[in-house]
Image (cartoon, grey):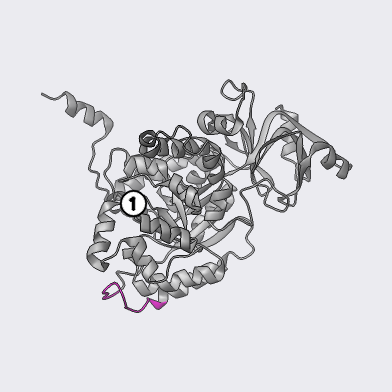
Amino acid sequence: MNQLTRELLDAPGPLLLVPDAVLLPEGPADGYAVVVADGTFHAVGPEDEVVRAHPHLEAVRLPGHLLMPGFVDAHHHLTQSFGSALAFGEPSEIFRRVWVPLEGALDEEGAYTAAKLAALEALRGGFTTVTDAGTRADVDVDVVASAARDAGIRCVLGLVCNDADAGPTDGTAEAADPAVLARAERHLGRYDGDPLVHASLAVSIPEAARSATLRRVAGLAAEAGATLQIHVNEHLASVERSLLRHGLRPLEHLHRIGALGPHLLAAHATLLTPRELTLLADTGTAVSYNPVASAWKGNAVAPALAMAERGIRFGLGTDGTRGDGFRLTEAAEFAQRISYGLAAGDSSCGAGWTWLEHATRGGADAVGLRARTGVVAEGLAADFLLVDLTNPELALSWDMPWELVRRGNRDQITAVFVGGLMRMWRGLPTSWDGPALVRRAAELARASVARAPISRAHPTSTAARERSLAP
């Protein structure tokens, strides 16, 4: 597309867009058009019908392009972006040694810049929504909201509600910390009417909050129609601690205290028994399947194919590993193939469409935004991508959904729209200086990492090579 087309797309609207195809839930639809107005899809349908119904609009033709829903990242930690590469080669539960110390070293500018840097990477990779599991930086969480808003990305913003260290606790019947509950209630109402920021609550892991608090914040989230995010059954160590403390696995413990339900977003959920799969299915609890994070710093791969078969709600999450929506869908399929498909002789492993759907519509449902985004449909937010289909990887198309999963990548994304506005054009923000942000982030990251009491178990790759060559 040329500069004139970019200028037309960057107009305030309304826009009548005519791509080669539109990706609908049932598959790619050729000869379709959409109208974007007031931040939403005003019309979606066959080109002749849409054009006839909007004679006052000039069609913006997008030859060689697919219009598809933006990806939804169902699990992220935006203020951890300064240390993303510190996870390489590390054993599980690195949050204790890397993430908590790093976030603790951030001041307000550091937290804002880290969050905006993460948002930039996400937008470049086709994510129009990110779900932040709550920062542990000692700043007002609105700093993260401002970063997301300024970057132009939709954000489900968690507020950490941990209180296990607030006083004596036996882990079961103690009273919830009233200060934590008051902050949670204020947060849930803080972003009412915000076009991009959606409030959520978060508890780092079940053992980080008193049982009464888990029960109460779950109730608050349910009443507000918001999500409660908790890392659940991610690592062997946390499962074993729960068994020793409660006689139950973490997910079972949450069920016993009444915290499971459609409001709960269980991050990772990699170590699940058949009974726990049944609990997820019966309660409508959602899961964030994070395949790259599982490979980089986990103990197992979530049984996502089994979840899909059981009708368990789930989305795909990066966990801040790398912000490329296409590579995430490929990792989701590949992890299932390696972990389950090869042994069972399953050559399909979701047939491509499963992972594309759970990276978009399924992800929006899992994070509580089903009525807002995730699908190219009338009335929903105009959060979408324009994907170039003329490149060598996608031009010879026989099965577009499979090809997007297996051969798509972020350099094929021409434009990213959130709320009907073009936020990225060929990998660069349209309304702010991305390279300048990266330069400032590099400066702040060096200072923050040097200041943080980070402990790494694995040497750098260069040091590891030297060790391997030592006599």
The residue closer to the viewer here, 439 or 462, is 462
From this viewpoint, is residue 140 visible? Answer: no
**258 is higher (above) or lower (below) than 452:** below
The span picked out in magenta is 167-178
**181 is higher (above) or lower (below) than 206:** below
Mark 1, secondary structure of its residue: loop
Say what amino acid the circle numbered 1 marks: Leu
Question: What residue is at 49 percent from the left and 55 percent from the top?
Answer: 144
176 in magenta: yes
The residue closer to the viewer here, 309 or 166, is 309
Q: Position of residue 139 (x, y in %)?
A: 43, 61
Residue 242 appears left or right of 130: left
Q: Position of residue 69 (x, y in %)?
A: 63, 43
Question: What residue is at 17 percent from the left and 29 percent from the top?
Answer: 467
**Majority secondary structure in the magenta region:** loop
Residue 198 appears left or right of 307: right
Q: Which residue is mark 1?
A: 271
The crowding category of the residue bearing disc 1, from other C-alpha atoms within 10 Å (few below 14, some 14 to 19, many at least 20), is some
Q: Position of residue 389 (x, y in %)?
A: 64, 27
> Which quarter of the figure is the C terminus placed in?
top left
Q: Quadrant of residue 24?
A: top right
Residue 425 appears left or right of 410: right
